[in-house]
Amino acid sequence: MMTNPHGPRAFGGKGAAKDALLPEALYDLAADVGETTDVIGKYPEVAARLRALAKRMRDDISDSATNQKGKNRRPVGRVPASGQ
């Protein structure tokens, strides 16, 4: 699954919650800028690489859509002082 980064005007004005999970999809933006043809089945190695990257990011900094807390998560707006 992936998180929907689009605002409420996306998807024909119907929108989706900011943290809604969407089905996986992969698009060739050089050939299909309108994202009309899902090519995830044609490039399973790319999809696997992106899933692994997403998992690393969730493990590191969290994911509000899956309620996963990352190991390097910090309070909003707070940066640790240098040397801490």
Image (cartoon, rainbow, N blue to C red):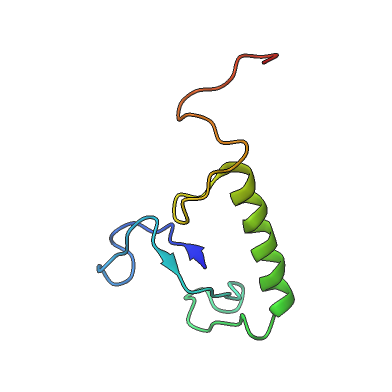
For this rendering, which residue is in front, 59 or 16? 59
| Image quadrant assignment for residue 71 | top right
Q: Residue at x 74, y 75 (%)?
A: 45
Horizontal side of 31 relative to 15 (left or right) equals right
What is the quadrant of the C terminus in the image? top right
Q: Residue at x 50, y 23 (%)?
A: 78
Residue sitting farthest toward the left: 14
Residue sitting farthest toward the right: 45
For this rendering, which residue is in front, 50 or 1? 1
Q: Say above or below: 76 vs 18.
A: above
Q: Position of residue 20 (x, y in %)?
A: 39, 62
Q: Say above or below: 26 vs 54.
A: below
Q: Position of residue 22 (x, y in %)?
A: 44, 69
Q: Say above or below: 47 vs 9.
A: below
| Image quadrant assignment for residue 81 | top right
Q: Position of residue 18 (x, y in %)?
A: 36, 55
| Image quadrant assignment for residue 46 | bottom right
Horizontal side of 56 relative to 38 (left or right) equals right
Horizontal side of 13 relative to 48 (left or right) equals left
Q: Residue at x 69, y 61 (%)?
A: 52
Q: Residue at x 45, y 30 (%)?
A: 76
For this rendering, which residue is in front, 66 or 76? 66
Horizontal side of 14 relative to 6 (left or right) equals left
Q: Say above or below: 69 vs 76.
A: below
Please tell me how many numbered marks the rendered image carries: 0
Q: Position of residue 25 (x, y in %)?
A: 54, 75
